[in-house]
Image: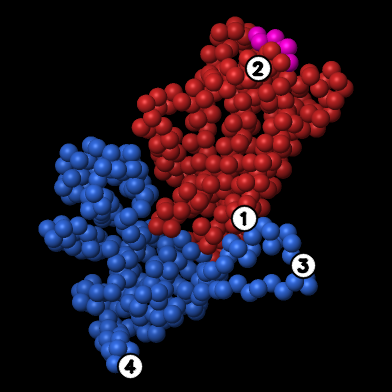
Chain colours: A red, B blue
Amino acid sequence: MTQTQRNSLMAMLADVAEAARLWHVWLRLGTWDVRRRYTRTSLGIAWIFLHLTIQLAAVGFIYTILLGQEIQAFIPVLATGLIIWGYLTSSIVEGGNALITSEGYIKQIGLPIHIYVFRAFVSITIVMLMSSLVYVAVALLLRIPFGWGTLWVLPGLILLGVVSILLIFTFAHLTPRFRDIGQLASSAMQVLFYLTPVIWPADILEKRGLSIVYEVNPLFHLLEILRRPLLHAQSADVVDYAFVLGLVALLAASAITVTWRFHRKVIYFL
Amino acid sequence: MPSIQVERVVVEFTVDAVSLNSLRSFLYRRKAQKQPTARIVRALNDVSFSVGSGERLGVIGPNGAGKTTLLKALAGIYTPQQGIVTVNGHVCPLFEFATGFEMNGSGWDNIRTRSLLLGMAPREIEAKIDEIGEFSQLGQFLDIPVRCYSSGMLLRLAFATSTAVDPQILLLDEVMAAGDEAFIERARRRMNGMMERADIVIFASHSLTLLPTFCSRTIWIDRGRILMDGPTEDVIGHYRQAVAASLAR
């Protein structure tokens, strides 16, 4: 039985659970989105790898010369940084448009709208996982050591995925109502991009005694919980996980609040 | 047992939603400054009725009366600002066939996607997909991307798929016109079959000849209000009189 006017927290969670149960719907829509983006290009899905490789080669080359980085150590840092950052940016920008681009479906078919949130999560995550293959190639090429400690990458990936889906839930419900949010958020991400050791190594600041800049930045710690297992085959520090869990808690609170407040109203803003 | 209950439902659209309640006006809200009042359209105004198992309910009214909004509220697409909509049973909305294609997907791909969205289980889809393809009469075109289809072909594909569903509660919004002459006749038969399979049918239509053949009961709405709710013949009789009166004026 469905009663459309109740909007308790439980009703919202029941809607999300119902949407999750329809996994074969959003999994199909999400994989189609990835295919659609690259059909009729002659290189197809290879573009995912190519984008990253070009970026990696360009930034790697320039920074090696300008900053005197040792290329052997720098390229893996850069690759992980670009992949993770790309994933977060897509979660905010594409995720913010998740409901707007699904308007046609939403207005014709009475399925819980959260399936379109999961749909965006699927397509964004597939692209991220595929571009990760570039990192695997880099790691093999540069003979980065791996061992049991590398397995710490799994909890890291799960936490990253959780951050992504919480971002998508928040921005997907917020953006249709406040259309400026999308622009605002992508500018904010740009600023954060320069503030966070994504394409420059953290020790540059450390040497100048400015390590506080990244130490209080939860995004740095999010990068760390993936970089440490991948680059050094060991777990990140407890403080890194603590920061990331704090970030997850914060994002969860915002995702639940925003979804609860807007999920029944968002149709009127599409 | 499937049933629908609608109690004192109000659905409103705020015309200037985005501009009036934008981030800017949200941030710069000053008490002294008078907020312009938003223009609000009341699409459904205090609507109540209930439908029991086995009923076929017709909905008539002029354009803009609120027929589609009513069906969309029943489908759970619009959440009413006031009132309660209670629906028991699986709802299958058939509103229009023009949206929801994966343009680069083949006809078969599109049959699968649409069936999933309409609530068919993957196993059910595989069992029915041949029959759907056959009904569409698109033959080998089903293997090519639908972006190469004409609009008539797209319509056939969507119609064939949508009418393969076994709905408990079927919400129909004026979708009978589909394709060329030969197809229309087959489409009509298939639609009849679907309406017979459904437990509850709510059918919004402008066709005063079609409605009595399907629906024993009809509601007449205008400007978001129910003007009449009763046996189809009576309601249509009064509706005709009202239309004639407004023409004579």
Badge 4 marks a residue whose secondary structure is: loop
The percent position of residue B128, horizontal first and vertical second, equals 24, 45
Cα separation between marks 3 and 4: 49 Å
Front of the two marks 4 and 2: 2
Q: Amino acid at mark 4?
A: Arg
> Would you place residue A200 above or below residue B187 in this image?
above
What label sits on residue A178 in the rendered view? 1
Q: Are marks 4 and 2 on the same chain?
A: no
Instruction: Determine which residue is flagged by label 4.
Output: B249
Q: Depth-wise, is mark 2 or mark 3 nearer the camera?
A: 2
> Which residue is depicted at the point 33% across and 75% down?
B59
Cα separation between marks 2 and 1: 39 Å
Is residue A81 placed above or below A96 in the rendered structure? above
How far apart marks 4 and 2 lie (CA) works out to 80 Å
Q: Is residue B112 visible?
A: no
Q: Which residues are magenta?
A: A67-72
Residue kind at label 1, given as amino acid type: Phe
- Picture quarter with the C terminus of chain B: bottom left
Extreme residue toward the top, this view: A143
Circle 4 marks a residue in which chain? Answer: B
Spatial distance from mark 1 to mark 3, Cα to Cα? 19 Å
